Amino acid sequence: TTKGTIDETKNQAQLFLRVAWESREKIESVSYYDVDWLHQWRYDDNAMIERRKQSEVTKEHAIEKIHDLQDDGLTKVEYSSIMASESEDGAIFELLQAIIRDGAAIVKNTPSARDDKEPVSKIGRTLGGALSHGSLYGDTFTVKSVPNAKNVAYTSLALRPHQDMAYYESAPGLQLLHCVVNNNVVGGESVLIDAMAAAHEFRRIAPKHFKTLVNCPATFVKQRKNADIVCHRPHIALKEGAGTNDINREIVSVTWSPPFEGPACL
């Protein structure tokens, strides 16, 4: 059992909450909490509403971002700057900040594997310390059109918008794509969709169907030789809390991968 005495102390312009803890062992312990930090993470109703306004992605946010990107496009960071040890993480911070803000970024002048062994792996390890989800395809794999392909990705057919590896219970949070060859090719452009904003608008225009995607778990599956991975989750996940039947809760994730969906288990 512990109890604390609380007072406030000022350190220059910063205000702290000081808690002096007492225990049966009579060992004094003191904790200091930044008052601004406590205020930022408070859980009263008004604070939760304000935090949702700051974090939830809506159609208006997505459209505004598209307008912002029309002139200069996605943030572009030089490969050499990311890999330079003397960069003091400036280029890495710029890249990650752009991904968090815009959802994607471009690494310029990435060398081919002929000139620099495994450049994609190097960037991945630089950003995250290690690579993940390599059990199916390896740490990196080449996507190209092949005869008698068993995966639509290895054909010249257009791919509809989807997320990769949705059949994992914990899907990768960051994916790196390296365009190695694109000589005189018609088509093949990458299309990025803000799924969070799309779900937010979908709730407005079709609330009944939105509720179905929230309440009915989908089956995401990967089956092939030496692999059988299945994960059940709804297409749209809302924030936990009271009123679980309330579809107006904050949208926290969207999973959309029609090429890897199996029969629904209702």
Image (cartoon, grey):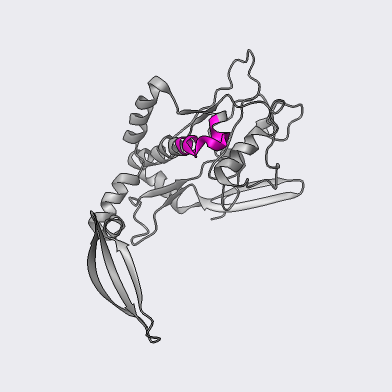
Q: Which quadrant of the view contains residue 101?
A: top left
- Residue reaching furthest to the top: 184
Position of 154 with respect to 30 (left or right) is right
Residue 255: where, in percent of width, then height? 50, 44
Q: Which quadrant of the view contains residue 158?
A: top right
Position of 52 with respect to 116 (left or right) is left
The residue nearer to you, when weighing 3 against 150, is: 3
- Residue reaching furthest to the bottom: 24
For residue 212, above or below residue 107: below
Examine the rendering and report whether any part of residue 162 can be seen: no
Question: How many marks can you see?
Answer: 0
Residue 92: where, in percent of width, then height? 50, 37
For residue 199, above or below residue 183: below
> Mostly what secondary structure, the magenta segment?
helix
Q: State the extent of the magenta-drawn residues as a range.
A: 81-95
The residue nearer to you, when weighing 77 against 59, is: 77
Report the residue at 61% width, 25% height from top: 179
Residue 223: where, in percent of width, then height? 70, 46
Residue 153: where, in percent of width, then height? 65, 32
Instruction: Assess whether residue 15 is covered by the magenta stretch.
Output: no
For residue 233, above or below residue 209: below
The quarter of the image holding the N terminus is bottom left
Examine the rendering and report whether any part of residue 178 can be seen: yes
Report the residue at 63% width, 12% height from top: 184
Instruction: Assess whether residue 90 is covered by the magenta stretch.
Output: yes
Position of 203 with respect to 127 (left or right) is left
Report the residue at 35% width, 51% height from top: 247
